[in-house]
Image (cartoon, helix red, strand yellow):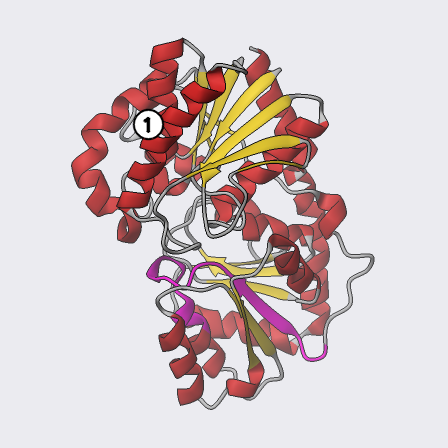
Amino acid sequence: MKILVLTHEYPPVGGGGGHVAQDIARRLAQHGHEIVLLTSHWGDLPKDEVQDGMRILRVPALRREAFRASFISMAAYIVHGLWACFRLLKEWRPDVIHVHFAVPGGVLAWAFSRLTKIPYILTAHLGDVPGGAPEKTDKWFHWIFPLTHRIWRDAKQVVAVSEFTRRLALKHYDVDIKVIHNGVDLSKLAPAEIVINKPPVIVFAGRFAEQKNPLQIVRSLAQVKDLSWEAVLIGDGHLGDEIKAEVRAHGMEERFVFPGWITPAEVQAWMKKSDILFMPSLSEGLPVVGVQSIASGLALLVSNIGGFADLVDEGKNGFLVDDVEDYAEHLRALLSSPEMLKLMRVVSIEKSQFFALDFIVAQYERLFER
């Protein structure tokens, strides 16, 4: 089958949604499908290359930061992407379009589909839904929300990455929405055995932005300074300087590592060297880093929002937190009991079987065939 994949974010550009698109497209290519993926150009990345058995086209998008898309960069992706789609059509006609994100990719998929009659499937991440990530997208939805209904309505199928995302979307769009979770390649992540680090390593990965609430990590860890631990904060963003200043204010510089905005393989390497994922996010769909963490056998200490509920069995492989004051209490429990921490890590690996990439991709293949 010939599948055109549209996503304005694709590694090394963007966050978790881009990694989801990458994993699914790669596995589809391994299954023998012809894949052309259209994404945003960034830096000195090739504009046209064959990678992992699929063709990747990168169009100008005026993107200034790898970890954040502006309204202008999204608009540029739509304009240049539509032109690139029609140029592609002269030599290669897809059977179906798989688009990640209702905006901007959904706009491009809808316009191209209307003009060519090629059907599209929309995978919606939390930021696609009004109210899903208010600090990032609410000001955009104020202007574009009336235009998004056609994108959702005309898709042959809408997929949400979590039940929370599905329920929130149904408040705004009267369409059939199927849940297909984000998946990961378990073979690349599962540890040979679980050994608690000495001291235990606490990891965070994501944008240094309000949505991810990384300052809470520093403040909670400051409350357990008397215990032994190390923290790794992976990512970048406009809160970076403020986070490091908070670390200095508590005299914890020697206990924190800031690897920066690194490759997916490097993130996975840090996961394998860690014990606890700490993510006090204010909003999430189904974070890829969360799925990677349970596959890597980490205990989860996360906020009780969004798709985290799909990843955590309360008290068994981690904790879902409603009150920020409880983060320190749970950290103290995990750091004070290596036995409990190890047991939670084992349960995470067991739970990760439900997020195996082959199982996830098989569900998409059935949609494409239909």
User: Residue 290 placed where, x, y %?
Assistant: 56, 52
User: Residue 300 placed where, x, y %?
Assistant: 57, 59
The amino acid sitting under disc 1 is Val
Question: With 206 as the anchor, is 364 left or right in this view?
Answer: right
Question: For the point 63% across and 29% down, which residue is it?
Answer: 361
User: Which residue is outermost to the right?
Assistant: 192
Q: Does the magenta stretch include residue 262?
A: no
Say if residue 175 shows up in the picture.
Answer: no
User: Which residue is outermost to the left?
Assistant: 143
Disc 1, SS: helix
Which residue occupies the foreground of this view, 169 or 350? 169
The residue carrying mark 1 is 107
| Mark 1 neighbour class, 10 Å CA radius: few under 14, some 14 to 19, many 20 or more | many
Question: For the point 61% across and 80% down, which residue is it?
Answer: 229
Residue range (magenta)? 198-217
Report the quarter where the N terminus lies.
Answer: top right
Q: Does the magenta stretch include residue 212?
A: yes
Which residue occupies the foreground of this view, 3 or 346? 3
How many tags in the picture? Answer: 1
Report the quarter where the C terminus lies.
Answer: top right
Question: For the point 66% across and 66% down, which residue is it?
Answer: 275
